[in-house]
Structures are given as structure tokens and as C-alpha cells.
């Protein structure tokens, strides 16, 4: 543990550093009538690194419940993955929507 020392060599106070976990954010996919189920699975596998089985389960949740959780990340990672998913969708002509919410 670091110490704050005075010039005479005496220890004056103990400095304690406390690291705090950064806030985490949920990335959600939202259902629409145009984006194919196959494309949603592809996005979940390639952008969110989900296994084929996990991707299928999340895709079905999006389809049946209107939205599904892709993952929980620090803000920068959540934002990057959400934007990447939407950019990939736009490139393929799909209106897929994502959102980020604080956990």
C-alpha cells in the first residue's frame, strides 16, 4: 500500500486507493417486420460473439418478445457493438434497431 512520506522519513498517512467498477450497459436488439431471422443470428454471432445456439435463442426472444439482450458491457464497448450491428444492417438493407441502457 503506498505511503505519503515527509522529507524526514516519517510516515505521515496511509493512502488507500479504491478501484470502482465502471458502470455496465445492456445492448438490446429490437424486432421489426423486415430484418430476417437469419441476419439477426449472423449479427449476434459476428458482432456479439454468441454461439449459434445462443444467437438462435436471442433471435427467437427478439422475434417473440419484441427485444432481446445481446450482452452487457462497459459503455464504450456497448456503443461500439450497437453501432456496428446497425451499420451492418444498413449495409444489407435492413432496418434493425439497437438500444443501450444502463444496467
Image: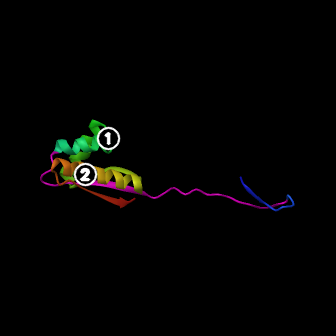
Please determine whether, in this image, residue 17 is positioned above or below residue 91: below
Question: Mark 1 packing: few (<14 Cα in 10 Å), some, or many (20+)?
Answer: some
Residue at point 29%, 41% (across, down): 46
What's the mark number on residue 50?
A: 1
Q: Does the magenta stretch include residue 29?
A: yes
Answer whether labels 1 and 2 touch (C-beta < 8 Å). no
Q: Picture coordinates of residue 90 (x, y %)?
A: 20, 52
- Residue 70 x/y as whole percent: 31, 49
Q: In this view, does 3 lie above or below 54?
A: below
Mark 1 vs mark 2, CA separation in Å? 18 Å
- The residue under label 2 is 87
At 19% from the left and 49% from the top, the residue drawn is 91
Question: Splitting the image into 4 quarters, where does residue 99 fall?
Answer: bottom left
Determine the residue positioned at 35% across, 60% down: 101
Which contiguous range is marked in magenta?
10-36
How many numbered markers are drawn? Answer: 2
The quarter of the picture where residue 13 lies is bottom right
Dividing the image into 4 quarters, which one contains the C terminus? bottom left
Return the mark for residue 93. Answer: none
Residue 87, image x, y percentages: 25, 51
Amino acid at each position: 500500500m503506498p505511503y505519503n512520506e515527509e522529507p524526514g522519513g516519517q510516515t505521515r498517512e496511509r493512502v488507500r486507493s479504491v478501484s470502482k467498477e465502471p458502470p455496465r450497459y445492456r445492448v438490446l436488439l429490437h424486432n421489426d417486420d423486415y430484418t430476417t431471422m437469419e441476419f439477426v443470428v449472423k449479427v449476434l454471432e459476428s458482432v456479439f460473439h454468441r454461439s449459434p445456439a445462443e444467437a438462435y435463442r436471442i433471435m427467437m426472444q427478439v422475434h417473440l418478445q419484441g427485444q432481446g439482450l445481446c450482452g452487457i458491457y462497459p459503455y464504450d464497448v456497448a456503443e461500439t457493438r450497437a453501432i456496428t450491428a446497425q451499420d451492418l444492417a444498413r449495409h444489407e438493407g435492413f432496418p434493425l434497431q439497437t438500444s443501450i441502457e444502463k444496467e
